[in-house]
């Protein structure tokens, strides 16, 4: 099974994703340069975290016009899995691969911390290795992570089970103090209607080894291998 990891100017989590996939999963991974038009036959595309184009206009707003994004969009339209993490989530929303947008954190401060998540949808190719309502400890590092959408879209996401992860406290309860960026309904990750595109602000690729303080991100990658590589 082959993962393609897109590298934009300013990406800084592409190497983290590569290490998680190659060293922890034992799967193949290649870097995809943002100016390319070739996904190199990748089965799964990863849009990694970082600060594409310096986030000078708006996080993800410039990267969505990179040539490689035409291929990523085509891959997604054909049912191919796309994992969009942090800045990748911002790019995916800007590109219309996912609904909603990511705004400045409610605190107006960059947040770098370990947070608790609750797995809300465990039927997608990304989340099927998690038990329903499983509690996960995953790191975050972002300044524009406040997920927002219009009320009708939020209602649809909730009603159709498109909320993949939600910020909670250690007891698994949705609480204002556990919502690190002020996202609507504590939403930390969503999937598209077809279930093949996942966007999330927390970094599962940084939670795959005990030395990193958590292995709760590893099942996400294992689920992809089990579902896509079967």
Image (tube, helix red, strand yellow):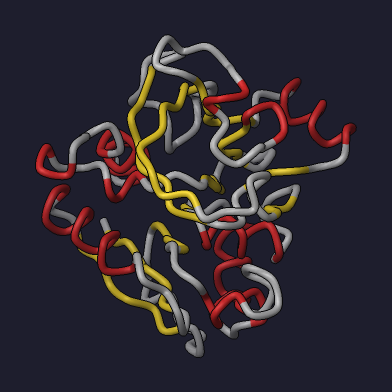
Q: In which quarter of the image is the N terminus?
A: bottom left
Measuring from the top left, give residue 61's x and y in whole percent: 69, 73
In the image: residue 44, left or right of residue 215? right
Of 27 and 189, which appears nearest the observer?
189
Task: Identify the residue at horizontal 30%, vertical 43% (top origin).
Answer: 221
Measuring from the top left, give residue 8's x and y in whole percent: 47, 80
Q: In which quarter of the image is residue 92?
A: bottom right
Task: Identify the residue at horizontal 56%, vertical 25% (top origin).
Answer: 177
Q: In which quarter of the image is the C terminus?
A: top left
Measuring from the top left, give residue 49's x and y in whole percent: 44, 62
Of 96 and 146, which appears nearest the observer?
146
Q: In which quarter of the image is residue 226?
A: top left
In the image: residue 19, left or right of residue 228? left
Q: How many labels does the image show?
A: 0
Of 163 and 177, which appears nearest the observer?
177
Task: Identify the residue at horizontal 18%, vertical 37% (top origin).
Answer: 213
Task: Identify the residue at horizontal 33%, vertical 68% (top origin).
Answer: 14
Q: In which quarter of the image is residue 139?
A: top left
Name above or below for residue 181 compared with residue 41: above
Name above or below for residue 225 compared with residue 78: above
Measuring from the top left, give residue 50's x and y in whole percent: 44, 68
């Amino acid at each position: 099974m082959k993962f393609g990891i897109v590298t934009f100017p300013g990406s800084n989590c592409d190497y983290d994703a590569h290490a998680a996939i190659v060293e922890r999963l034992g799967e193949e991974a290649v870097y995809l340069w943002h100016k390319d038009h070739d996904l190199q036959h990748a089965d799964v595309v990863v849009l990694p975290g970082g600060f594409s184009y310096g986030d000078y206009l708006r996080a993800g707003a410039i990267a969505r016009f990179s040539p490689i994004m035409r291929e990523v969009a085509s891959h997604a339209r054909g049912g191919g899995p796309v994992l969009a993490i942090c800045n990748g989530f911002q790019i995916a929303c800007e590109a219309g691969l996912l609904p909603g947008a990511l705004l400045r954190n409610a605190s107006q401060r960059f947040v770098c911390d370990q947070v608790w998540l609750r797995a809300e949808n465990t039927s997608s190719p990304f989340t099927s290795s998690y038990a329903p309502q499983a509690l996960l400890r995953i790191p975050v590092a972002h300044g524009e992570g406040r997920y927002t959408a219009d009320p009708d879209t939020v209602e649809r996401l909730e009603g159709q089970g498109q909320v993949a992860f939600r910020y909670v406290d250690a007891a698994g309860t949705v609480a204002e103090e556990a919502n690190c960026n002020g996202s609507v309904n504590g939403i930390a990750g969503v999937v598209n209607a077809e279930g093949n595109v996942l966007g999330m602000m927390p970094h599962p690729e940084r939670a795959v080894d005990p030395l990193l303080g958590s292995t709760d991100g590893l099942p996400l990658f294992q689920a992809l291998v089990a579902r896509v590589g079967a």
